[in-house]
Image: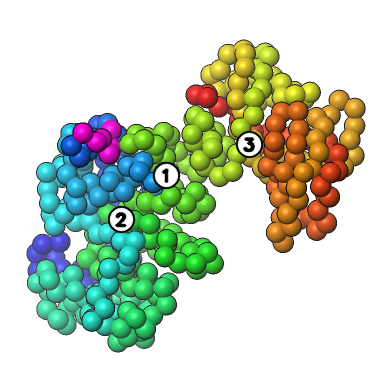
Amino acid sequence: MNKMSTISSLSRSSAAGKKQAASVEFRNVTKRYGNVTAVDDVSFTIEPGKLVTLLGPSGCGKTTTLRMIAGLEMASEGQILIGGRDVTNLSAADRDVSMVFQSYALFPHMSVLENVAYGPSVQGASKKDANEMAMEKLELIGLKGLEKRAPSELSGGQQQRVAVARALVLEPQVLLFDEPLSNLDAKLRRRVREDIRELQQSLNLTVAYVTHDQEEALAVSDHIIVMSNARIAQTGTPRELYEEPANLFVADFIGDANIVNGDLVSLAGPNAQVRLGSVTLDLPHRGLRQGAVKLAVRPDAIMIDETVSPGALAGTVSKASYLGTQVEYEVESPVGHLFVVQYGRKQPIAPGTPVAISFATQRGVAVIPEA
């Protein structure tokens, strides 16, 4: 926001009456650094009020994409639109977006209140209005009463919340998160990601969120854009990506997957009979024809039983790990080495035990179209 009158009116608005969320659209966007292409002909749309995660390994282009939304990097080719407005050549200050950085980037010499009020103050709000706006956001994210503390007096999770409040205080059209939970321990990451998701939904915010953590992406996202080698590998809902991976990279990257070889023997409507060792599975063929195929089999879709019956796919437990809520196994089988997860079992099956292997086809077995 660039006008004092707009800032003042926003400071008096209620949490329920915020600015309308905006869409984000990339049209054939490419970013080059000399001879290196960091983002290659990428197109996608983030719908207003949705949280979309850019997910992928280091160097895939996800952070560069986020920085181009923010205006911190300029596109080499293509168009970037926010709320239907072409912002391709606009600076970061003119894009009405805010970013929460991985490092939080809080000013150590300022109090929590001063950190959050800094943005409105720089943009011309009076100290009174800036403090009112800051207090509103601190109360919203559960930090009221801590406004006089220095960042060094806060926990990691509290510092992260201050960074979110500072990003929210100017009511941006789009809120950006760059690996926001990477500095937190596992238990706190889970709690804070739930806070971010609840805040995004309650305020109807448009959010672009970058992470390399698959579980985090599955937990918070309306849609996920999986990137690999500067391109989009697949876009979809968390369920679509997990249950219907478009290619081998996505199948292997999203969650744990056993990649095994099978044989598509016949087609019947949308489904196919797929032979996997000595068993035959009825699965959606996903456009594939008869012949050799690869399948992604999720660990919890594999069932093992100590009672081995004739004709069953036989295996042998090679390793068992008790993890409280689940037992993880490594099982040797005719179709390869399998990673298996069983929930609710208290006594693990001992290594060396012969087992019968079966598959829950409705819970995570899919042929991979582009194997």
Q: Secondary structure at mark 3?
A: strand
Which mark is on residue 258? 3
Q: Quadrant of residue 160?
A: bottom left
Range covered by the magenta-colored residues = 35-40
Q: Which residue is mark 1?
A: 57
Judge whether residue 38 is colored magenta. Answer: yes
Q: Amino acid at mark 2?
A: Leu
Find the distance from the CA under tag 3 to the CA under tag 2. 33 Å
Residue 92 vs residue 22, the one in the foreground = 92
Q: Identify the residue at horizontal 60%, vertical 21% (top origin).
A: 293
Residue 179 x %, y %: 38, 57
Position of residue 45 in the picture relative to residue 216 (left or right): left
Q: Is residue 222 above or below residue 44?
A: below
Q: Of the residues under marks 1 and 2, which one precedes in the sequence?
A: 1
Q: Quadrant of residue 305?
A: top right
Which mark is on residue 176? 2
Q: Amino acid at mark 1?
A: Pro
Q: Identify the residue at horizontal 17%, vertical 78% (top origin).
A: 129
Is any part of residue 355 visible from this angle?
yes
Q: Of the residues under marks 3 and 1, which one precedes in the sequence?
A: 1
Q: Secondary structure at mark 1?
A: loop
Find the distance from the CA under tag 3 to the CA under tag 1. 19 Å
Q: Identify the residue at horizontal 69%, vertical 38% (top origin).
A: 338
Q: Is residue 47 above or below residue 165?
A: above
Q: Secondary structure at mark 2?
A: strand
Q: Nearer the viewer, mark 3 or mark 2?
A: 3
Is any part of residue 140 visible from this angle?
no
Find the distance from the CA under tag 1 to the CA under tag 2. 19 Å
Q: Of the residues under marks 3 and 2, which one precedes in the sequence?
A: 2
Q: Quadrant of residue 140?
A: bottom left
Figure quadrant of the N terminus:
bottom left
Judge whether residue 2 is colored magenta. Answer: no
